[in-house]
Amino acid sequence: MQEVVPVECKTRKAVPSEALKEEAAPGLRGPSEGEELIRLDNVYKIYQMGEETVHAADGVSLVIRRNEMVAIVGQSGSGKSTCMNIIGCLDVPTRGKYYLEGEDVSGMSDDQQADIRNRSLGFIFQQYNLIPKLDVLENVELPLIYKGISERERHERAKAALDRVGILSKMHNMPSQLSGGQQQRVSIARALAGDPPIILADEPTGALDSHTSQEVLGFLQRLNAEGNTIVLITHDMEVAKKAKRIVRIADGRIVEDFMTGAGSEGKERSS
């Protein structure tokens, strides 16, 4: 087998795509400043498919810091979903290290990863993943049950999260009684209720129309402006441009990593 040469992507200064050069704003807070929340050090994820060896992640190195809003963007088969699964503690690297809040989670067991997910990560999914038989409030409370939080505190935190995304009035509705945009707001509230340091949004606008997509992206920008760290996974560069920073992946490697200047825009739109 041909030797694989690791690629140190976090130190690479890639030039933004031509279509985005005018939007890249110099002087913004760069990845070298602030507290590290996520660090991937030369991460590989290798699958054997018959006689073919597939490097879904091929020497990925990446640092994401507190209060960043980062879009990881790439087409189908690029490796972005593999990176998302590793960042979300849904999978482990074949080799390399992954540090989450300074803790090496690279070789953790399934149970240990579940504990980390419950403590440190809030997930927003493309298909919302709401439980049809539970009302809105109960859906938002669900991850808090796994944390062992008392019923009274669960109610208070779930209501506060629903209020934060502007949908508290629907707390006793069933998911089937909500529009797609409203269901995604419930999904965002569920991610917020546990107060995780990182919110991981996997194609959060994929099932929404263009108007509702802009509304949901506006919520994510506002949450970031309020101090939440957002990692947005998308195939759509227009969606990615709503983040402060874009990390583009192709063939399992980071090929671009640059600031967009979207931070001030997000604050304006959320006011």
Image: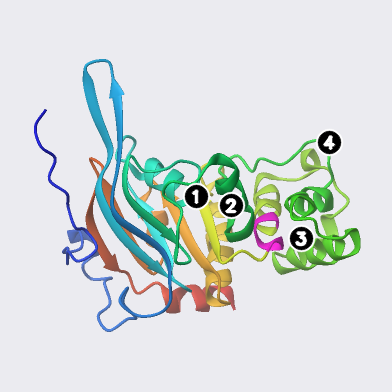
- For the residues labelled 1 and 3, the Cα–Cα distance comes to 26 Å
Q: Amino acid at mark 4?
A: Lys
Of callouts 3 and 4, the N-terminal one? 4
Here the colouring is rainbow
Label 4 neighbourhood size at 10 Å, few (<14), some (14-19), many (20+)? few
Q: Is residue 109 above or below residue 148?
A: above
Q: Which mark is residue 167?
A: 3
Q: Is residue 39 above or below residue 53?
A: below
- Seen at 80% across and 42% down, the residue is 177
Residue wearing tag 1: 88
Local SS, label 2: helix
The stretch in magenta equals 190-194
- For the residues labelled 4 and 1, the Cα–Cα distance comes to 26 Å
- Within the magenta stretch, is there residue 192? yes
Per the picture, the main secondary structure of the magenta-coloured stretch is helix
Residue wearing tag 2: 117
Local SS, label 4: loop
Q: Which mark is residue 133?
A: 4
- Image quadrant for the C terminus? bottom right
Of callouts 1 and 3, the N-terminal one? 1
Label 2 neighbourhood size at 10 Å, few (<14), some (14-19), many (20+)? some
Q: Position of residue 232 (x, y in %)?
A: 46, 56
Q: Position of residue 248 (x, y in %)?
A: 28, 53
Label 1 neighbourhood size at 10 Å, few (<14), some (14-19), many (20+)? many
Q: Amino acid at mark 3?
A: Ile
Q: Amino acid at mark 2?
A: Arg
